[in-house]
Image (cartoon, helix red, strand yellow):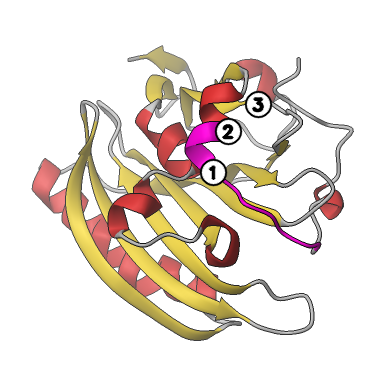
Amino acid sequence: MRFFHAVLAAACLCAAPVHAFDVRQILESSGVLNAGMNAEFDRNRDSPAQLYFDFLLPDDSDALRVVVRPGDDPSYMTIFLGQPGGALVETVSFLHVPVPEASTEQRIGGIGRAMQDVFFPMLTQRHSEASVMRVTDAMLGPYPAVELLGRYEEGGESGRGLIYVRMLGILPPAGENTLLLYSLMNAGILKPETAADLANSFGGYIARSLQFVARRDADGDMVPF
């Protein structure tokens, strides 16, 4: 399955001279894979998934290197996107976050606070100049969501400098399970100028194509949405 590039190593996405990098142009010219968190991919993990979902993923090409790695609970997977033989441009990660069933507004408020008070600080604790730019409610297709935009400086000899963060807490149609999707974007390559530019990265493309297909109930049985 071309979607799972098991033989590729994220280490090949190391620092190297950068060149003009146009996400829209690459997406228009790249092959697209119907990927996601499915049963076949779940077999590569140490624990069963709580949510299953589909999304569209740009394929490996002359202009883009794509590496997908399964994670262990609560991480579903991380996608590394970069220049072939060159710099890491963006990572897109998926996490499972349980949020007790309540009203949509209460759940969105709860995951928004968790993103701002817990997940963003954990993500940026080893980096400098970390700040949250905004937290807003959103709709991702039919799914209620909350968006956090932030930034930090990735220093050190191998650091990439300014990194933009876009987190999305997304509510599936039913159940306590919530999906947290976050993108880390290399500002030196993507050169975003507005908040809209952050939503038009590879992570934004993946998020807009996302569809929930099934969940596990309290007995561990898979239930289609």
At mark 1, the secondary structure is loop
Expressed as whole percent of the image width and height from the top left, the position of residue 154 reads 62, 77
- Which residue was labeled with disc 3? 42
Side (left or right) of 169 relative to 19: left
**Crowd band around label 1 with a 10 angstrom C-alpha radius: few (<14), some (14–19), many (20+):** few
Dots 2, 1 in contact, CB < 8 A: yes
Q: Which mark is residue 22?
A: 1
Looking at the image, is mark 3 or mark 1 earlier in the sequence? 1
At mark 2, the secondary structure is helix
Residue ID at (53%, 58%): 185
Which one is in front, 122 or 175?
122
Give the extent of the magenta segment.
16-25
Residue ID at (89%, 33%): 7
> Mainly helix, strand or loop, the magenta region?
loop
In the image, what residue type sits under mark 1? Asp
Does the stretch in magenta take in 57? no
Looking at the rendered structure, the number of numbered marks drawn on it comes to 3
Q: In which quarter of the image is the C terminus?
A: top left
- Which residue was labeled with disc 2? 26
